[in-house]
Image (spheres, coloured by chain):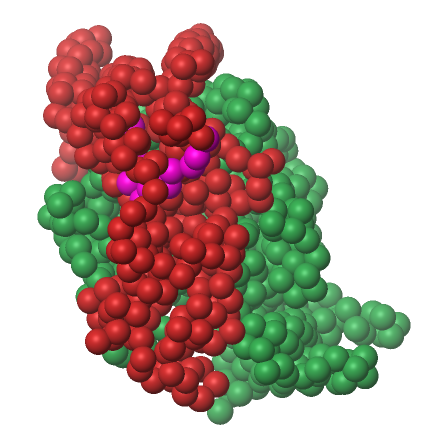
Chain colours: A red, B green
């Protein structure tokens, strides 16, 4: 009986120690959304259960190993006790009760996390190997509906954002640790568009990560998220909605950022998943079939709209998306070509 | 050189010849049907090459089996010839040759499984160490080394993805073979049978793994693959040719699971010794039976899903590519319908070993034997209804997630019964710290971590954060090390005298235990913490600004401790096999029938069937025994 008493005290002490360690030492990232608050509440419940069960089993085992070990020169067997039906029933029924309760609160937190706000702003998220693009619907001052694309996800604070997730090739997953939620992104058009609701509550800069392995560039499939005040968000959106009134090459840079070109093509001469754009225009390029072509205007244009036509030696086919002629207007493509030309020398 | 006349060597030669033959066959068929053998368009050319190579590889696997002689008896039967049922080995050949040849003795097959398993675990471990070196700091450095480009034709992120994917699947193949090793070696011996019910099927089930493993590993040289071990389409439809080697290799290993499980089920149900009712059967056999039922009923689904991906790649049939009208989520359902129960296939035999060893080394009955036995079945049954918890963020029907949350949390109940029973078994025992016991105790603690990290993944809201992070990696490694690696090592040490007639080196065993236990704790707890902090899995690089560098370095050190521990294990068993101290009699003072026989176990186990006269684990009950080895009458010397 004295053994049970000591073990009982040790279990309580160990539970408190472990529980405080898990809940108070910041092993979860910063909270930056309403959803994170709800989810972390459930995490804390889990942490206390983990602390209790680890303490219970480990204390009994470690105590037994010390107190009930076979001493030097000792012979014979342990105490003969082969089981206790009542005890077995208790440690079956009680856990059933606990897990059912867990499941009930699990369901409740889930419905909190996914609660719909009819006022939510909609952002279309386009994921492709290996870049992100975020598209907003805006009405301009002239009352024209237009779409604004960005490579940065800007969200207003304290307003629910409804992200509609589109993939253009394979499965990706939208994940911002500070928001605590993620959702896989499926290819295949409207039927496969999935939704994710986030209510950011802290201004700051975060990172969207792709959380589902999507090929060799998976590790670098990142994008910036900015949570800003509502007013700042509105003015940012208005600014984006204005036509690109810069030079062709400067507009080209903007589209190259927005549509993820720079995820694979560097501007500083380093070889990434695709060839660099620095010093490309006007120079000779060796292809996989051994021939050599000059990177002129037509070559650049073809490489964007039909990327498999000419593969540069040392690079893989089927890596670049083949639908840029659908995603971009003719003007935008020409501006990107103008931008690459400007990097020629 | 006798080695050249072994089944192993002849099989490999036949496989190489068969592969060439098969490729020629596909090319001939293409010519007959007027299809081109090459194409100026690179993508089409790659596809034609893939069709030809895959055809060759499949034929090669079949010719391996013919060349090794696995089908010989069946061919004879088909021709109406008689074959001998006597499997006594040819005395003119040295004993080691049996292990490289088709042999029908369950103990030989068990050792074959075990050694192949350890080799695969070694390969999986090497892959892990390679990418652990890369991950010990931010930035991509090691895997960009020139040597990889020269050896394999690729490096950097794709090499990381390939190594990470192969680590997963090669370990899984190794674990499946380890499970086969334990079931084959132990089940007939523990229930008093002289062999498995179908010895030829048993040999088939082992040997199909050899071409399977060879093909799986060859994927490294066919461009690798970058999908992780799950192989989700559409990514797996675009991956290099190495993807096909992965699919075919796993397919063959899966065939082994199905064939092997039939044997275990029939053997445990029909060949038990006199007096051995189900509840007097040793607990390991309960676990093996539950495992075999899972393998027998679930493995078909992974075979099916992989076959569909193969057909989609080879013949352009659209099953999963949603851009062409397929459904990518369907694959995940098929895949996890096997791959979740598969996890219990990996752990149940290990949990059986723990339950088997704790009573012997605590000198006490296994607490609540029936409950422990039935909890294996409880886990097995529930495991069929939880697969979609791998898909909480996959985009499947949102409402379906709720019932899967309930069923998943229920797994905790039978698992809890095991923990409580183990703890109660140790209570007031007379605990002896031999190496097998240390590994069994280590397994309990590690598996406990795997158990308690399950519920946060089961409740959907918290899984939204944890899914596809290192937390899942940590949870999975906890279950695999606690449920398989540690118990497997414990089992090999424990039954080592039975296999070889010699003792392992106790001191090296204890050093290995502490190396692995401390290294693993470091590794898996850091994995869990990194996941909670939001580090996603399957990435070759991470932002230095996240501040994960020092943790990743420590994780690498932990990983290497585990790796070196396993190398020490290999050294210990290889050396002790021939040089160990001779171990005679009932080394562990066990009640189990196999320890009442000499070491190593005689060729046909029990010439005289024994009779079960008591409970298997009644340590501490005076004047009781489990088996009467000579039921025909007490030995004449007693009179």
Q: Position of residue A222 (x, y in %)?
A: 29, 46
x 70%, y 42%: residue:
B270
x 53%, y 87%: residue:
B4
x 73%, y 66%: residue:
B85
- Is residue A240 visible from the viewing direction of this image? yes
- Is residue B438 visible from the viewing direction of this image? no
Q: Position of residue B368 (x, y in %)?
A: 45, 21
Q: Secondary structure of the magenta portion, mostly? A: strand
Q: Position of residue B212 (x, y in %)?
A: 56, 66
Side of B68 relative to B137 (left or right): right
In this picture, is B360 found above or below A305?
A: above
Looking at the picture, tell me which residue is in the foreground, A27 or B424.
Answer: A27
- Counting labels gives 0
In this picture, is B464 found above or below B597?
A: above
A334 magenta-colored: no
Residue lying farthest to the bottom in this orientation: B1
In this picture, is A173 found above or below B17?
A: above
Q: Can you tell which quarter of the image residue B249 is in? A: bottom right
Looking at the picture, tell me which residue is in the foreground, B335 or A62.
Answer: B335
Looking at the picture, tell me which residue is in the foreground, B575 or B300.
Answer: B300
Residue lying farthest to the front in this orientation: A142
Q: Can you tell which quarter of the image residue A111 is in? A: top left
Side of B97 relative to B142 (left or right): right
Q: Can you tell which quarter of the image residue B462 is in? A: top left
x 50%, y 80%: residue:
B94
Q: Position of residue B42 (x, y in %)?
A: 54, 77
The magenta stretch spans which residues?
Answer: A145-155
């Amino acid at each position: 009986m004295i053994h049970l008493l000591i073990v009982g005290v040790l279990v309580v002490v160990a539970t408190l120690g472990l529980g405080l360690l898990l809940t108070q030492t910041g092993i979860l990232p910063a909270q930056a959304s309403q959803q994170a608050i709800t989810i972390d509440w459930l995490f804390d419940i889990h942490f206390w259960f983990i602390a209790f069960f680890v303490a219970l089993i480990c204390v009994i085992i470690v105590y037994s190993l010390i107190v009930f070990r076979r001493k030097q020169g000792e012979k014979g067997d342990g105490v003969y006790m082969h089981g206790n039906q009542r005890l077995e029933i208790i440690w079956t029924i009680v856990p059933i009760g606990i897990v059912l309760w867990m499941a009930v609160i699990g369901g409740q937190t889930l419905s909190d996390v996914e609660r719909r706000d009819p006022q939510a702003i909609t952002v279309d998220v386009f994921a492709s190997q290996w870049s992100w693009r975020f598209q907003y619907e805006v009405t301009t001052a002239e009352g024209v509906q237009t779409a604004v694309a960005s490579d940065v996800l800007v969200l207003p604070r304290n307003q629910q954002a409804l992200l509609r997730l589109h993939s253009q090739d394979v499965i990706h997953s939208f994940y911002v640790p500070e928001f605590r939620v993620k959702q896989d992104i499926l290819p295949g058009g409207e039927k496969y568009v999935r939704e994710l609701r986030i209510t950011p509550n802290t201004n700051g800069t975060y990172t969207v990560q792709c959380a589902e392995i999507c090929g060799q560039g998976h590790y670098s499939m990142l994008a910036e998220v900015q949570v800003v005040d509502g007013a700042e968000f509105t003015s940012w959106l208005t600014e984006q909605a204005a036509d690109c009134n810069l030079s062709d090459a400067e507009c080209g840079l903007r589209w190259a950022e927005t549509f993820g070109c720079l995820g694979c093509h560097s501007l500083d001469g380093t070889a990434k998943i695709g060839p660099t754009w620095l010093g490309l225009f006007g120079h000779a390029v060796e292809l996989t079939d051994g021939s050599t072509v000059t990177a002129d205007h037509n070559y650049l244009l073809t490489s964007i709209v039909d990327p498999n036509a000419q593969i540069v030696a040392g690079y893989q086919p089927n890596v670049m998306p083949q639908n840029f002629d659908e995603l971009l207007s003719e003007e935008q493509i020409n501006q990107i070509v103008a931008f690459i030309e400007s990097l020629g020398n | 050189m006798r080695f050249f006349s072994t089944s192993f060597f002849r099989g490999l030669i036949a496989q190489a010849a068969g592969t060439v033959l098969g490729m020629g066959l596909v090319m001939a068929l293409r010519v007959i049907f007027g299809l081109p053998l090459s194409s100026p368009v690179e993508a089409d050319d790659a596809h034609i090459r893939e069709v030809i190579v895959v055809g060759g590889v499949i034929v090669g696997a079949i010719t391996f089996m013919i060349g090794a002689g696995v089908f010989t008896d069946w061919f004879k039967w088909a021709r109406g010839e008689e074959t001998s049922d006597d499997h006594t080995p040819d005395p003119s050949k040295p004993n080691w040759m049996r292990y490289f040849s088709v042999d029908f003795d369950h103990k030989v097959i068990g050792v074959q499984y075990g050694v192949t398993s350890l080799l695969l675990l070694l390969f999986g471990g090497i892959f892990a160490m390679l990418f652990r070196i890369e991950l010990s700091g931010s930035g991509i450095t090691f895997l960009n080394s020139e040597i990889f480009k020269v050896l394999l034709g690729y490096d950097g992120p794709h090499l990381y993805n390939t190594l990470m994917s192969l680590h997963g699947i090669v370990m899984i193949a190794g674990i499946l073979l380890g499970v086969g090793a334990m079931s084959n070696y132990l089940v007939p011996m523990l229930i008093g049978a002289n062999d498995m019910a179908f010895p030829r099927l048993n040999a088939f089930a082992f040997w199909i793994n050899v071409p399977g493993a060879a093909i799986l590993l060859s994927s490294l040289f066919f461009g690798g693959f970058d999908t992780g071990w799950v192989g989700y389409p559409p990514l797996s439809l675009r991956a290099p040719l190495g993807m096909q080697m992965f699919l075919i290799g796993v397919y063959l290993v899966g065939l082994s699971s199905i064939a092997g499980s039939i044997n275990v089920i029939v053997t445990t149900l029909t060949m038990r010794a006199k007096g051995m009712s189900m509840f007097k059967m040793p607990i390991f056999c309960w676990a093996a039976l539950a495992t075999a039922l899972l393998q027998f009923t679930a493995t078909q689904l992974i075979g099916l899903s992989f076959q569909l991906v193969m057909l989609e790649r080879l013949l352009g049939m659209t099953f999963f590519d949603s851009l062409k009208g397929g459904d990518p989520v369907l694959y995940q359902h098929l895949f996890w319908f096997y791959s979740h129960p598969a996890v219990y296939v990996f752990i149940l035999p290990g949990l059986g070993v723990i339950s088997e060893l704790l009573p012997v080394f605590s000198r006490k009955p296994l607490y609540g034997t029936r409950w422990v036995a039935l909890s294996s079945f409880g886990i097995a049954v529930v495991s069929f209804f939880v697969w979609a918890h791998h898909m909480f963020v996959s985009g499947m029907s949102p409402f379906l997630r709720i019932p899967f949350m309930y069923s998943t949390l229920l797994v905790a109940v039978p698992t809890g019964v095991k923990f409580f029973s183990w703890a109660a078994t140790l209570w007031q025992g007379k605990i002896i710290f031999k190496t097998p016991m240390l590994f069994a105790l280590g397994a309990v603690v590690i598996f406990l971590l795997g158990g308690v990290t399950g519920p946060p993944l089961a409740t959907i809201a918290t899984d939204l954060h944890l899914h596809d992070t290192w937390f899942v990696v940590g949870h999975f490694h906890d279950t695999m090390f606690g449920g398989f690696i540690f118990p497997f090592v414990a089992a090999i040490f424990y039954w080592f005298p039975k296999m070889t007639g010699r003792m392992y080196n106790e001191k090296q065993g204890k050093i290995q235990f502490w190396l692995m236990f401390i290294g693993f704790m470091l590794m898996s707890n850091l994995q869990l913490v990194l996941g909670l902090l939001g580090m996603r899995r399957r990435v070759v690089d991470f932002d230095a600004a996240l501040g994960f560098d020092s943790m990743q370095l420590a994780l690498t050190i932990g990983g290497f401790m585990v790796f070196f521990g396993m190398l020490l294990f290999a050294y210990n068993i290889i050396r002790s096999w021939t040089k160990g101290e001779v171990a005679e009699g009932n080394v562990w003072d066990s009640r189990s029938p196999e320890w009442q026989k000499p070491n190593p176990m005689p060729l046909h186990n029990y010439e005289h069937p024994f009779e079960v006269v008591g409970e298997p684990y009644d340590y501490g009950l005076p004047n009781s025994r489990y088996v009467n080895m000579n039921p025909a009458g007490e030995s004449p010397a007693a009179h």
